[in-house]
């Protein structure tokens, strides 16, 4: 499992920004930037849609004021679903990361098997990445939503 101080692996994901989609390694997206990345089990799911993503949408300007260059939301969904979810949630300030085959999630060691819910999914977490290096990792215990919220991550930025 990825830890504080580790580099982000060069695994490609679908990157949905301002309605456009491209595929590139997450490590490349992180170069020279301070990023807050949060991950969740699935787009359009209850906690993810009611609390997790909306918190980052609501506090986006505060993250940017604290020197964050990019806020990214990762889920094991395809880029079409991530774009539709961003549109549904009015999340234009958030970069959506589509990890459709869970390659990045597994490379990070942050996968879980949700069984009939959807198979391999991401665990719920958030991290601060500075120029490709993880400087903070907030991993949720199963079925909780506390340490990876927008408010909790804002507090870690000082």
Image: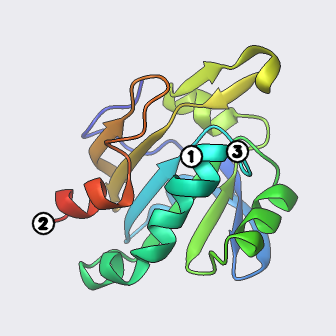
Determine the secondary structure under disc 1.
Answer: loop
Give the residue at x 56% y 72%: 94
Using the image, determine if residue 141 lies above or below residue 96: above
Q: How many angstroms separate mark 1 from mark 2 (CA)?
A: 29 Å
According to the image, label 3 marks what residue?
45
Using the image, determine if residue 78 lies above or below residue 66: above
Instruction: Give how far across and how far down residue 108 sits, in percent.
Output: 50, 32
Give the residue at x 23% y 78%: 66
Dividing the picture into quadrants, the one containing residue 3 is: top left
Does any portion of residue 11 appear in the rendered image? no
Closer mark to the observer between disc 1 and disc 3: 3
- Residue neighbourhood size for the residue with mark 3, other residues' Cα within 10 Å, grouped as few (<14), some (14–19), many (≥20): few
Instruction: Give how far across and how far down residue 38 sits, in percent.
Output: 47, 51
Compare residues 18 and 106 and report the one nearer the observer. Answer: 18
Using residue 142 as the reference point, say whether residue 102 is left or right of it: right
Q: How many angstroms separate mark 1 from mark 3 (CA)?
A: 28 Å
According to the image, label 1 marks what residue?
10
Q: Earlier in the sequence, mark 2 or mark 3?
A: 3
Give the residue at x 35% y 56%: 129
Is disc 2 in contact with disc 3, using a CB cutoff of under 8 Å?
no
- Residue neighbourhood size for the residue with mark 1, other residues' Cα within 10 Å, grouped as few (<14), some (14–19), many (≥20): some
- Residue neighbourhood size for the residue with mark 2, other residues' Cα within 10 Å, grouped as few (<14), some (14–19), many (≥20): few
Using residue 148 as the reference point, say whether residue 75 is left or right of it: right
Which image quarter is the N terminus in? top left
Determine the secondary structure under disc 2.
Answer: loop
Closer mark to the observer between disc 2 and disc 3: 3
According to the image, label 2 marks what residue?
158
Q: How many angstroms separate mark 2 from mark 3 (CA)?
A: 30 Å
Does any portion of residue 79 appear in the rendered image? yes
Disc tally is 3
Dividing the picture into quadrants, the one containing residue 91 is: bottom right
Give the residue at x 39% y 61%: 36
């Amino acid at each position: 499992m990825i830890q504080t101080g580790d580099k982000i692996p060069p695994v490609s994901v679908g990157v949905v920004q301002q309605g456009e989609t491209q595929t590139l390694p997450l490590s490349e997206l992180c170069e020279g930037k301070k990023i807050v990345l949060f991950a969740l089990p699935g787009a359009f799911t209850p906690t993810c849609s009611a609390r997790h993503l909306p918190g980052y949408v609501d506090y986006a300007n505060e993250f940017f004021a604290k020197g964050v260059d990019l806020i990214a939301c990762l889920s094991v969904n395809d880029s079409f679903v991530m774009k539709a979810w961003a549109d549904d949630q009015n999340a234009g300030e958030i970069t959506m990361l589509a990890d459709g085959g869970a390659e990045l999630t597994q490379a990070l060691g942050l996968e879980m098997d949700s069984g009939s819910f959807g198979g391999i999914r991401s665990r719920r977490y958030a991290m601060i990445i500075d120029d490709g290096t993880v400087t903070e990792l907030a991993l949720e215990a199963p079925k909780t939503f506390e340490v990876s919220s927008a408010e909790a991550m804002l507090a870690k930025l000082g």
